[in-house]
Amino acid sequence: MRLPLFDLPPPAQQDWLARALARPTPASARNLSDGFRLPGREGEPRPAAVLVPLVNRPDGLHVLLTQRSADLPDHPGQISFPGGRVEPADLSLAAAALRETAEEVGLASDRIAILGQLAHYETVTGYHVTPIVGWVEPPFSLTPDPVEVADAFEVPLAFLLDPANQQRHFRMLGSMRRDFWAIPYRERYIWGATAAMLIILDRTLRGAG
């Protein structure tokens, strides 16, 4: 079912999203973490925040994503939202997400309007991640950090929120089967935590009516 969001002009889209995100999270968008932890990552999860950047393009809303460097210790080479762990100096989860976004891709916070946040997701690497949804208004330029980010690109939001494109895949880790969400897009393979957080966004918006 097509979301009403996509039939609205941009200013009304922004208002619709903010109202939808302010409502209680529907049950279908909660507890989507799979509970699996990599060996050595047990214990209390560490707080983190990511930005879900919705870019206002002439042909519709797009989501800005990054491909992580293959040299990073956590989730190397995977597609992710800009973000990272919350630091003591961060005044809020949104502040942490904006800081990390500026550090990773050079997107200035004055181009971003915070719309709300989604239900948290716990990663296999032991992070308690809160997705912060932001409206990004062009024009802007990106300067990806070459150490952390191999690439930055955009995907149409309508594609990501189409249930026909949301798939369940699995991998075997020894004798253990791990199931996860995936949203393949052209040559990109969006999966794991990032795909799950997009599912959370989709279900949150659909539950808003």
Image: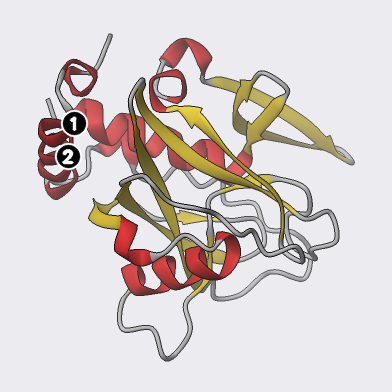
Residue at image location 67% in from the left, 70% down from the top: 42
Residue tagged 2: 14
Using the numbered discs, state the Cα–Cα distance from disc 1 to disc 2 in whole angstroms. Answer: 6 Å
Q: Residue 122, how many percent across, how many down?
A: 52, 57
Residue at image location 67% in from the left, 58% down from the top: 37
- The residue lying toward the viewer, choosing from 100 and 60, is 60
Residue type, mark 1 in image: Pro
Picture layout, residue 205 above or below residue 186: below
Q: Is residue 26 something one can see in this rendering?
A: yes
Can you tell which quarter of the image residue 200 is in? top left
Mark 1: which secondary structure?
helix
Can you tell which quarter of the image residue 174 is in? top right
Question: Is 110 situated left or right of 9 in this image?
Answer: right
Q: Residue 84, how many percent across, how many down?
A: 55, 67
Residue tagged 1: 10
Q: Nearer the viewer, mark 1 or mark 2?
A: 1
Q: Residue 105, how many percent across, how many down?
A: 57, 59
Do labels 1 and 2 touch, CB within 8 Å? Answer: yes
